[in-house]
Amino acid sequence: MQKYNYLFSVLCFFSVSISAQADGIRFEETMAGYGSVDGIYREMRVNLNVNIDDIDAWENNINHTANITGEMIIDELPTNTVTGTLNIFSQSTTQSCPPSVSSCYHLVYSMKINDGSSIPNYFVGFKTVSNGAGFDIIDDLTTLQACFTQNPDLPLEDYLTDDCRSTIQVEWWKNWVLWDFYWSFDVYNKPWYRWDISVILKFLKVVFGPVAETYFDWLSW
């Protein structure tokens, strides 16, 4: 009887352990371009550390965000740290989708700039993901249309106005950018039986799936 109780306890332990675990992933992302700061366009770069504690929850629950930390470097201005969130599959509006796409969804970055201001300053923007054919999906998915603002809850289309627009991009055409991005992956909190590479592929499928569907529809995701 004691043997069966022991086996039952072990099974319960593994069940609880598995249910308590999720596929978490951390990675680094660098974007560069220009920002409209007080009406003046300046070269800028952000170096971000992104932490997604549960890829499935992040994909399926609009309120489950990833955490962002990092630094913002703007030409001729002080470097500041940033903290914030990354939200996937945010609701699009008619005005926020590319002109040739009838529907889309967005990855929304919301970063508080830790510059010591009495009224907080934010850098908020979005990348667009769509299943429309065409090479421009690469640019849509790697380009952040953003705004320096003290109101982090603006409608998405406001980030596309001439008064607001700042544009930074993952420079995917530079080999070292992609190299650093891939090798920065750190998988954690996964079930013991799952390989790290499977979690990385899951993340890539969630974020870059539409690219593969457009250009490599023969791939089985």
Image (cartoon, rainbow, N blue to C red):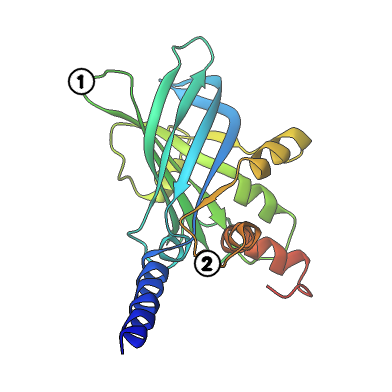
Residue sitting nearer the eye, 142 or 198:
198
Residue sitting nearer the eye, 177 or 133:
177
Give the image location of residue 131, x and y in percent. Answer: 63, 67
Extreme residue toward the front, this view: 2
Q: Which residue is mark 2?
A: 103
Residue at x-position 63% and y-position 39%: 170
The mark nearer the N terminus, 2 or 1, is 2
**On residue 118, which mark appears?**
1
- Residue 92 in view: no
- Residue 51 in view: yes
Q: Is residue 77 above or below residue 209?
A: above
Residue sitting nearer the eye, 162 or 214:
214
Tell me the kind of residue under disc 2.
Ser
**Horizontal side, residue 169 vs residue 179: left or right:** left
Q: Say which element carries label 2.
A: loop
Q: Is residue 217 above or below residue 118?
A: below
Disc 1 crowd, CA 10 A, few/some/many (<14, 14-19, 20+) = few
Residue at x-position 74% and y-position 33%: 176
Residue at x-position 60% and y-position 29%: 33
Residue sitting nearer the eye, 6 or 41:
6
Name which quarter of the figure residue 159 lies in. Answer: top left
